[in-house]
Amino acid sequence: MSEETSEIKLTVNGDLITKIVNVRQHLVDFLRLELGLTGSHLGCEHGICGACSVWVDGLVVRGCLMLAVQADGGDVTTIEGLTETGEIADLQKNFVDRNALQCGFCTPGMLMTLAELLRKSELSSREEIREHISGNYCRCTGYHAIVDAVETTISDRLGDS
């Protein structure tokens, strides 16, 4: 029995991509295996850990729960694309400075989720930051350093430092 395939056209990190994919291939597998964008990680494969987080049409989604064909016509941004824009350079620096990453496995998904939060214009409290990353699981840091890095980034962006 042959696998059913479909042609998809989508924008990934600003590049228009046209590929024929297996209709059952998950978005994160497509990004990693077909496009070589390995920043998004496969963790739980149940949408719980957040390691596979990417943006589709500007919103964070779990790449392990979304099929590549569901992104047809969409605009996908991965950690590689977000890093390339420089939008989160300050957050990435603060992650390093605050030791908010240790093994680094969760970091790309965490950064994708936090970048979504930082796009809001209002100030976020520690509780709001924790709530926003509640779908991203980190086994190493205990979250305090991550929240510290985000607070520092917010403060710097508002000129409060």
Image: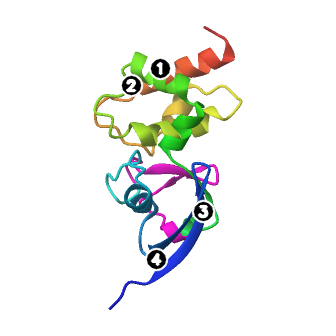
- Range covered by the magenta-colored residues: 48-69
Looking at this view, name the residue that lies furthest to the top. 161
User: Is residue 65 one of those drawn in magenta?
Assistant: yes
Q: CA distance from mark 2 to mark 4?
A: 37 Å
Sequence-wise first label, 2 or 1: 1
Judging by the rendered image, the residue that carries numbered circle 3 is 10
Which label was assigned to residue 23? 4
Q: Nearer the viewer, mark 4 or mark 1?
A: 4
Residue positioned 38% across, 25% down in the render: 100
Q: Amino acid at mark 3?
A: Leu
Total marks drawn? 4
Q: CA distance from mark 3 to mark 2?
A: 33 Å
Q: Position of residue 67 (x, y in %)?
A: 48, 68
Judging by the rendered image, the residue that carries numbered circle 1 is 94
Above or below: residue 133 compared with residue 11: above
Which label was assigned to residue 100? 2
Q: Amino acid at mark 4?
A: Val
Query: Closest to the observer: 17 or 50?
Result: 17
Q: Nearer the viewer, mark 2 or mark 4?
A: 4
Mark 4 crowdedness (10 Å alpha carbons): few <14, some 14-19, many ≥20: some
